Amino acid sequence: MSLIELKAPGQLSASANGAVIFLLDMPIEAINRPQRETAMKRLVSLFRKSRGQSIGKPSPGEKQGWQSILSLMVKLMEMPTFYEVCLPDRVQIHTSCLHFYQDMKFGDLEDLGIFVLDTHRQRLGNEESPEALLSQREDLKLLSRLATLSLEYDSPTPFYVQVLTDRRRQMASGTLGAREQSYLEDASALLRSPSEDSETILRLLLLRAYISVLQDSSAQKQLKDWDGIASDLRSAIASQARRALKSGWRGRGLLALLAALEALDLLDAKRIKKALKERIPLLVEANSQRLDGGVEAFRWEIRMFLAKHFPEVLGSPLDIVLPDSDHSSGDKSSFLRYVDAVVQYADDETRLAYLRDLLVDQDKSDSLASLRRYTVVCWLLRPTKGAFL
């Protein structure tokens, strides 16, 4: 752990990158709880040291190094981990200089997210290439996973194995102690506080993680006025989503749009329609555009949202025209997830209408389109749902 140091604000040394890769390759079972907590303390402190400082251009391989640190933090938090963080303030007692320490806070995730967003802005400037967007999206996914794990870890192992290996859930499960209560209350207070426009994506990500875990957790019953808190947070999602959609759908605006749609998916139909009543044309426009350079999957996410909540704007949602080049495993996966989303929320009458349209037009397409059409027809005839996921 001592090798993980900064050579300059936001810049890791070669030895630090090597240490991170070594820990990523190590089985999680080989890292005990005290080691995990020590590692998280150090990693969180690294980001805090760099926040608000000018970050230079990355050296070769360094961008992957910072993404590796996020991956390592996710790995460490996949088992119960509670860390303390050293604050920059110090107190002088006689000749000793002691650090103040504080328990882990949900705000650590915000600090981390702000650092990541600032890093992308400083290093990439106005660059909005597909590669830049994919890199930022990957970092945002890691942050989302980290936020979820800090709240709740669902162990796949049997209970007796959980006891032996210390696999227990995180903050939002079971009986809340003072530590967990403080963490969740501080989190809800932070998420209801004002935020900068530049932090909209981050706030949507954290809101989504908090609500998605708490709404299905017994911990909500132990929080004072949970119903009021939940209502405030859902209103915050709607407000932040409207702010995000003001950026349009091009370049980084596309990332904000996707973050908004993911968070809005947690709301009921009435709130979603109210939040998006003036923005549906924007989504339809984004859905109709061809995206290149590996970000075509982003368009599928928009189309899936529309198919679920606003199917009427798509006309015939399963009348999909795709070029022959869309045959990679990623494209196929996106296509199947989209079909599942359309069918999953359709009633029997709607399914029959989809099936009739597909069969009537079956002679109007080439062989590749016919194969996709056959796949959709078979799926429509199945009585079960979710087989593609």
Image: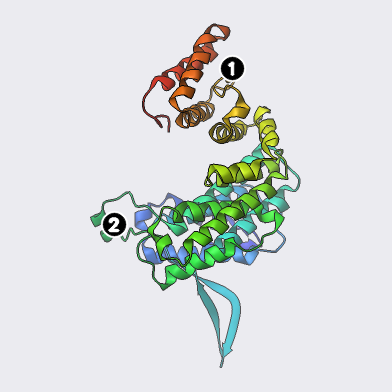
**How dense is the environment of label 1, judged by Cα within 10 Å: few (below 14), some, or many (20 and up)?**
few
Choose top left, top right, bottom left or bottom right for residue 45.
bottom right
From the viewer's side, name the closer residue of 147 and 236.
236
242 above or below 185? above
Residue extending furthest top?
363
Residue extending furthest right?
126
From the viewer's side, name the closer residue of 36 and 222.
222
The location of residue 211, given as percent across then percent down, is: 50, 54
Residue extending furthest bottom?
94
Work out whether mark 2 precedes mark 1 in sequence or the reverse, and give the earlier one. Answer: 2
Q: What is the C-alpha distance between the residues marked 2 and 1?
A: 49 Å
Q: State the residue at coordinates (43%, 49%).
A: 25
**Badge 1 is on which residue?**
324
The location of residue 16, given as percent across then percent down, is: 55, 58
Disc 1 marks a residue whose amino acid type is: Asp
From the viewer's side, name the closer residue of 30 and 52.
52
**Badge 2 is on which residue?**
162
Q: State the residue at coordinates (58%, 64%).
A: 190
Label 2–label 1 contact, CB within 8 A: no
Disc 2 secondary structure class: helix
Q: Is residue 318 visible?
A: yes
